[in-house]
Image (cartoon, rainbow, N blue to C red):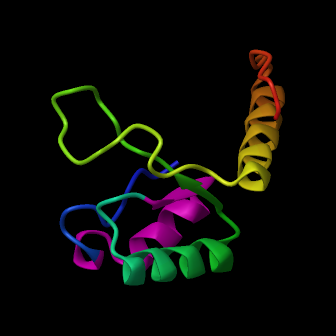
Amino acid sequence: MLAHPWGRHGPDSMPESAITELAGLGLAGLEVDHQDHTPADREQLRAIARRLDLVVTGSSDHHGTGKVGHLLGCNTTDPEQYDRLLDLAAQSAAGSGRRTPEILRG
């Protein structure tokens, strides 16, 4: 997962070519819905994720009371995308011979 790739510094901080390269190396998902991403950024990131078949996630990026403007739960991950993420984690674990912890599905 690549967390808020365009947060704070916008698209210039990580060009699409870098995201594409990471996807070729096994990147599974892209955090699109994050309060540091503008609506235009989110639209572009969602399109990149779709082109690269990456899981799209959302996050509040809440780190406790010290982080201002990042309310807990203000962005979430779509349930279908969450299921995709869990499936990819299970496949990865199986490929490495490890077990994944049991996770409740909604």
Q: How many marks?
A: 0
Q: Quadrant of residue 17?
A: bottom left
Position of residue 47 in the picture relative to residue 17 (left or right): right
Q: Nearer the viewer, residue 45 or 73?
A: 73
Tell me where residue 6 appears, x and y as whole percent. 31, 67
Decide: is 6 above or below 27.
Answer: below
Q: Is residue 69 magenta?
A: no
Q: Nearer the viewer, residue 43 or 65?
A: 65
Q: Is residue 20 magenta?
A: yes
Q: Which residues are magenta?
A: 11-33
Kindly identify the residue that appears in the image at 77 percent across and 22 percent down: 103
Q: Is residue 1 above or below residue 15?
A: above
The spot of residue 62 in percent (x, y) is 34, 36
Q: Is residue 76 at least partly visible in the picture?
A: yes
Q: Residue at x 40, y 70 (%)?
A: 18
Q: Residue at x 19, y 62 (%)?
A: 8
Q: With 7 as the anchor, is 18 left or right in this view? A: right
User: Where does residue 24 sit, x and y in percent of width and height?
Assistant: 59, 64
Q: Is residue 73 left or right of residue 26?
A: left
16 relative to 71, above or below: below
Residue 36 percent coordinates (x, y): 29, 61
Tell me, yes or no, if residue 27 can be seen here: no
3 in relation to 73, above or below: below
